[in-house]
Image: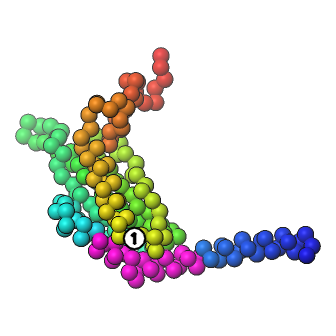
Amino acid sequence: MNTLDTEIFNLQRKVDQYKEVLQNTLKYREEWKASLREKIRSILQHLVTATKLDAEVVIRSEIENLEAVVLTLGTTKSGMFQKVSEEVHRDLIKHNGSLVYQQLFNGKVIVLINYPFIENYGQPRPPKTIAIYRPEELKEPYFVRHMEDLMQEITNWEDYDDDEPNKKIGFQLNFNPDGIESGQAER
């Protein structure tokens, strides 16, 4: 075999791998529609019922092949409000967090935790990525671990205090640990 044939052989392996990845995307998307979406919804609903957690499991399907199954802890009044006038108060709404199983463009499933946040009070913390799975990798025990991660993260957010220096609060205010506002240089 000459040098060009060796290079073509290596190129052919890459082309074959590319074709396999494209086929996997189609296979994963079909599996989501046929069974995985319902399996995720069912397991999450079972966990919510078994633990008596005040949560709802919803399917978000606005974009085909980018659907998500979301365990949401809902929204509530935060207990804080803006006084518009003596008689009128505007409540600040608190989003209590969620656990998301989102289809990716390639049919794999990303699992995310959305942290709680209060509208109009700082910036929401970016979601925490737990993992990305092929459909066959999502086993039932993982769902319990994901729920445990969710509960730990939102409990830490809710129980924020200064016992742990530099601990990040769920909504990031405009101050760094040294007290200097973000975006400003020391003077």
At horizontal 36% and vertical 62% (from top left) the residue drawn is: 100
Amino acid type for the residue under numbered disc 1? Lys
Residue lying furthest top in this view? 187
At horizontal 46% and vertical 70% (from top left) the residue drawn is: 137
Which secondary structure class fits the magenta region best?
A: helix
- Is residue 24 a member of the stretch shown in magenta? yes
At horizontal 85% and vertical 72% (from top left) the residue drawn is: 6
Q: What residue sits right under mark 1 in the picture?
A: 139
Rendered image coloring scheme? rainbow
Q: In the structure shown, which secondary structural element does the residue marked by tag 1 occupy?
A: loop
At horizontal 48% and vertical 70% (from top left) the residue drawn is: 134
Q: Is residue 81 above or below residue 73?
A: above
Q: In the rendered image, which quarter contains the N terminus?
A: bottom right
Residue 127: x percent and y percent? 39, 52
User: The magenta stretch spans which residues?
Assistant: 22-43
**Residue 18 visible within the image:** yes
Residue 136: x percent and y percent? 46, 74
- Is residue 125 a member of the stretch shown in magenta? no
Q: Is residue 183 above or below residue 11?
A: above
Residue 144: x percent and y percent? 31, 63
Instruction: Rate crowding at label 1 as few (under 14), some (14 to 19) or many (20 or more) other CA atoms within 10 Å.
Output: few
User: Position of 124 compared to 103: left or right?
Assistant: left
User: Position of 186 compared to 118: left or right?
Assistant: right
**Quarter residue 40 falls in:** bottom left
Residue lying furthest left in this view? 87
